[in-house]
Amino acid sequence: MSSAAISIAPASSAPEPGANTPYLRLGGEAGVRKLVDHFYDLMELEPRYAELRAMHPTHSEETRDKLFWFLSGWLGGPDLYSSRFGHPRLRMRHFPYAIGTKERDDWMACMVQTLNEVDMDADLRRQLHEAFAGTADWMRNKAEQGNMPAGNVVHG
Ligand code: HEM
C-alpha cells in the first residue's frame, strides 16, 4: 500500500474491492468516527487550541459529521461526503476562513495529537501525518510576508 491511496480526490482513487485501505486499517467507520471525535474533543477542551476553536463558527454535530463523511472517502472507504454535497472542493470551502501558517500549524498540532492518542499502527500513523500535513498546507489562503500561497483569495 502506498500513500497514494490517500487522495484529496476520492472519486479518482476508489480502492479496489477488498484492498487494505487506510479506512480499513483505521478500523472502518468506528475508527474514523473515533479519530474525528478525538480531534474535535481536543479542539474544544485543550486551552492551546482556543484560537483554532474560535475560528470554527458552529461546533455542532454536523461539523463532526462533515469531517467524518469527508475522511471516510478520503481514506478509501464509502464516499459519504460527495454523495451528499458533490465534489468536496475542500480548498474553496475554506475560503471564508483566513488560513495562514499559524492556523495551518494549529490545525496540524491538533491533528498530530489526535493521531498520537488514537490507537493505530505506526506505518498508518506516519502515512496519515504526511497526508494531513500536505492537505493542511494546501488549505492556506492568507497572504503573508514572503509566503504567498498559490490561491486566489487574499485575506487581510
Ligand atoms: C487536512 C486538512 C483539512 C481537512 C481534511 C479539512 C476538512 C474540513 C471539512 C470536510 C470541512 C467541512 C466543509 C463543509 O462542507 O462545509 C471543514 C470545515 C472547516 N475547516 Fe477544515 N480541513 C482541513 C484543514 C483546515 C485548516 C488548516 C483550518 C484552519 C484552521 C480549517 C478550518 C476549518 C473551519 C473553520 C471549518 C468550518 C467548520 C464549521 O462550520 O464549524 N480546516 N474542514
Image (cartoon, rainbow, N blue to C red):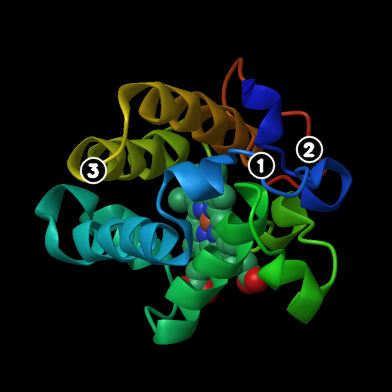
Location of residue 13 by image quarter: top right
Figure quadrant of residue 58: bottom left
Left or right of residue 5, residue 26 in this image = left
**Quadrant housing the N terminus:** top right
The span from disc 1 to disc 3 (Cα, nearest Å) is: 32 Å
Circle on res. 41: none
Please give the residue where the numbered disc 1 appears in the rendered image: 141
Q: Residue at x 52, y 37 (%)?
A: 100
Q: Is label 3 in a helix, a strand or a loop?
A: loop
Near mark 3 (Cα within 10 A), the count class, few <14, some 14-19 or many ≥20, is some
User: Tag 1's secondary structure?
Assistant: loop
Callout 3 amino acid: Asp
Q: Nearer the viewer, mark 1 or mark 3?
A: 3
Neighbor class of circle 2 (other Cα within 10 Å; few <14, some 14-19, many 20+) is some
Tag shown at residue 119: 3
On screen, residue 62 versus residue 143, left or right, reads left
**Residue 14 rendering spot, x and y as whole percentages:** 80, 47
Q: Which residue is mark 2?
A: 151
